[in-house]
Amino acid sequence: MTIVLRDPIPLRTLTGRPPAPGAAGLPLRPLLEAPRRPARVIAAFPSAVYLEMRVEPRAGTGQAPEPRVLAVVCSDAVRLPNALVLAATRRERPFRAVREGAEAWVGDGLVETEGLYVRARRWWDSVPALGPLTPAAAARGLLALEDALDEAEAAAGFGLAGHPDPETLAAACAAGDLPGAVEAAERIVGLGPGLTPSGDDVLAGLLVSLRLFGGAVRGGERAVWLAGWLGAAVTADVGTRTTALAATLLHCAASGAAGADVAAVLRAVAGREAPRPAVRRLLAAGHTSGADLAWSVRAGSRARLALAASPAAPHRATA
């Protein structure tokens, strides 16, 4: 799908050259289609640059509107749901002149900072289409995913290995226990080092798999309900409890938006992609992020099947 964005009022550019074209994830539409606003480069790597919007918190919430972090990435980098993707590869070093802490501008279809000037020319959908699926097909897909994860020894890279709360969270989701799931989730928000702590990666993978498989498989209403309330509870104050990037990714996951590597694994469970290559690509993402996300996609897929197999309990919005 291609959308032509309106041209901004001509302004002095920091780069002195025309903007490079990019493809933006749909969660970025509120940022890119709004008038130009200030931002700041919070991290700069050879394959990606992360910018945080300078916006005031919403009245009464203490939280900034989401998404507040935008990623500009190379074509061969990890494609997060909040990414604006360039045609250039990391070997071309498109971010060599970008420095952390620099002032930036985002809006009117453009992203600009010293050494970087990009226009969003088209959009890509970060919510993968998985269904419709029969319960039997979903069960076969989960078995294929588990085989691929075991073969790749994915558990060895899990960032929260030995911590009890991820298993507690997974068990609560499988039982449809919303209060128990919220309690376990609250204990792992922001847990771990880095731009996306392991606890947040676990929550993101779980939320997106529950929501998307719940919507794709017949009888998945309980999984969608659980994902909706758990996502609302997790994101209520996440902006004050973890990194800005992780908070944005949790908001994306709560709405069903996934990074490209996570989406590939979800499609593999749905029988629409080969599981082993998809698992290998995901496990290569970040220090522990790939393994954390793989663990939680498996946990969410298991929970979805367990919820469908157990007697339906009345939905209680007790979060």
Image (tube, grey):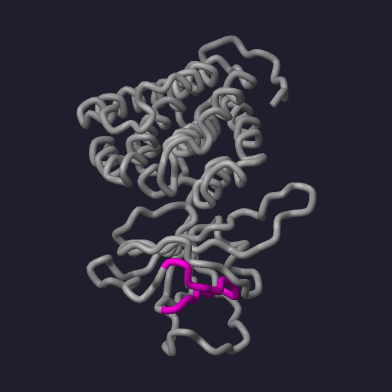
**Quadrant position of the C terminus in the picture:** top right
As drawn, the residue found furthest toward the left would be 151
**129 to the left or right of 280:** right
Task: Indicate the position of residue 31 as horizontal and vertical percent values.
Answer: 60, 64
Q: Is residue 183 magenta?
A: no
Q: Main secondary structure of the magenta part?
A: strand
* Residue under the image location 50 percent in, 86 percent down: 13
* Residue under the image location 54 percent in, 51 percent down: 244
Task: Identify the image quadrant of residue 93.
Answer: bottom left
As drawn, the residue found furthest toward the right would be 60
Task: Identify the image quadrant of residue 96.
Answer: bottom left
Task: Identify the image quadrant of residue 87.
Answer: bottom left
Q: Is residue 104 magenta?
A: yes
293 and 305: which one is in front?
A: 293
Task: Indicate the position of residue 185 as horizontal and vertical percent values.
Answer: 55, 28
137 and 103: which one is in front?
A: 103
The region drawn magenta spans: 100-114
* Residue under the image location 35 percent in, 46 percent down: 261
**161 to the left or right of 4:** left
Task: Indicate the position of residue 148 as horizontal and vertical percent values.
Answer: 25, 30
- Labels in figure, total: 0
Q: On screen, 101 above or below 239?
A: below
Task: Indicate the position of residue 178 as horizontal and vertical percent values.
Answer: 62, 21
40 and 248: which one is in front?
A: 40
Q: On screen, 255 above or below 83?
A: above
Q: On screen, 168 above or below 279?
A: above
* Residue under the image location 38 percent in, 39 percent down: 267
